[in-house]
Amino acid sequence: MLEVQRMVNINEAEKLVEQLVTRGDFRAAVDLLYKMIVQFARQKKFSKAEQLRERLLEVDPLALNEIISSQEIIDEEKEQSLDPIHTEIWSRLYNALSTEEKNALYFSLKDANYTINQTVFSQGDLNPNLFFINQGQLKVIYTDKDGDVLLNTLGPGQLAGQDNFFANTVCTTSAIALTNVNLKYFEKHSMLELEKEFPNLKQKLLDYCSGFQNVTDLLNRKKMDRRSQKRIKISGIGLFNLLNRAGEPIAKSFKGELTDISAGGMAFEIRISKEDTARLLLGRKINANFRIPGRQPGIEIDSNGIIVGVYPYPFEDYSIHIKFDKIIDRSVIDKIRRSIV
């Protein structure tokens, strides 16, 4: 018999299998198919290996040794091909799956990379994919009639898109790359295909996703945050610096017109000519430094925070809202309130 290693191409090998089947030499056909499966599995060509295994089942469903052994070899080669960094990040998910489910899920995932400010999915669009973040950060944004609101910042080991993946709805938020991002995504139609062979996979994935905040929770939380801290109207000019992840300034400071402050954050206005530039600010770390004008001089604010809201005003003005990293002491807030009354 012609050995697989010496074959000119796969088409010749498959033709030979069909010739053996036609002649009724099922034993030889099984042997040849098995060798081909092993070869393609060793070459990490799993799709072809599995296709040939399906043919093996058709040729002789009683060739149990070859059927079982070929599946074990495919699973073993798949296991060795898993990205160790990815599987470590998502170990809690993969540990909840059987070996077969783990391999099926992993090899159904697709890779994607996004650069800073590139949109992963947009509010109002139909994008039923589940995103597994391996590296970098995404910002989750909700847009209403007033402007953009930062709901969350996601990093390695966190999911995006789960609300749309498990429901037939359009995206209720947008996800935009805050840094360069590497992720894997799972398409909904792939889930529907895998369900046929692995009926428990969807529920296991749903159980895992339930451990993360959904969009409804984030929106409700944002409304609660807005109600919980009373804003005090202020005026004057503040100096602001965008910061890198280490908390260091990344450019020259710029001025903004102060509008209000609370224990948890503040707002200021600034003129920005391009909407894309304004959106780029959302989710960025920032330092705010200014003095509170009023009857009690000397009240200075020097706080780091994150930009959680960008709201457009007429004539290219934007209202920028900051959430402080640390809550301002109540005594300071009381002093500010007394100073401006």
Image (spheres, helix red, strand yellow):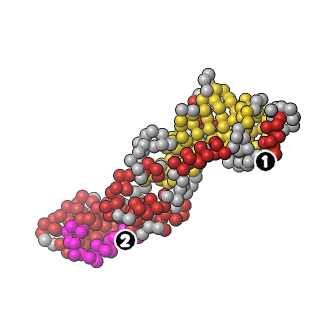
Q: Find residue 329 and name its label.
A: 1
Check disc 1 and give the amino acid type.
Asp
Amino acid, disc 2: Ile
Q: Residue at x 52, y 65 (%)?
A: 92
Q: In this view, does 212 lie above or below 98?
A: above
Query: Would residue 169 be counted in the magenta stretch?
Result: no
Query: To which quarter of the image does residue 79 belong?
Result: bottom left
Foreground: disc 2 or disc 1: 1
The magenta stretch is 56-77
Residue 41, above or below 111: below
**Image point (55%, 45%), residue name:** 219
Q: Which of marks 2 and 1 is nearer the N terminus?
A: 2
Say which element carries label 2. helix
> Which residue reaches farthest left?
23
Q: Is the magenta stretch mostly helix, strand or loop?
A: helix
- On screen, residue 341 versus residue 102, left or right, reads right
Residue 73 belongs to magenta span: yes
Residue at the limit of the structure toward the bottom, as seen here: 65
Q: In which quarter of the image is the N terminus?
A: bottom left
Q: What residue sits 28% from the left and 61% below the top?
A: 51
As measured in the structure, the alpha-carbon distance from the residue carrying label 2 to the one carrying label 1 is 63 Å
- Residue sitting at x 31%, y 61%: 196
Residue 4 showing in the rendered view: no
In the rendered image, the quadrant that contains the C terminus is top right
Q: Picture coordinates of residue 318 (x, y %)?
A: 63, 30
Extreme residue in the top direction: 315
Please say if the residues under marks 2 and 1 sit with CB atoms less than 8 Å apart: no
Helix or strand or loop: what does disc 1 sit on? loop
According to the image, label 2 marks what residue?
73
The image shows residue 52 at horizontal and vertical percentages of 27, 64
Residue 279 vs residue 208, the one in the foreground: 208
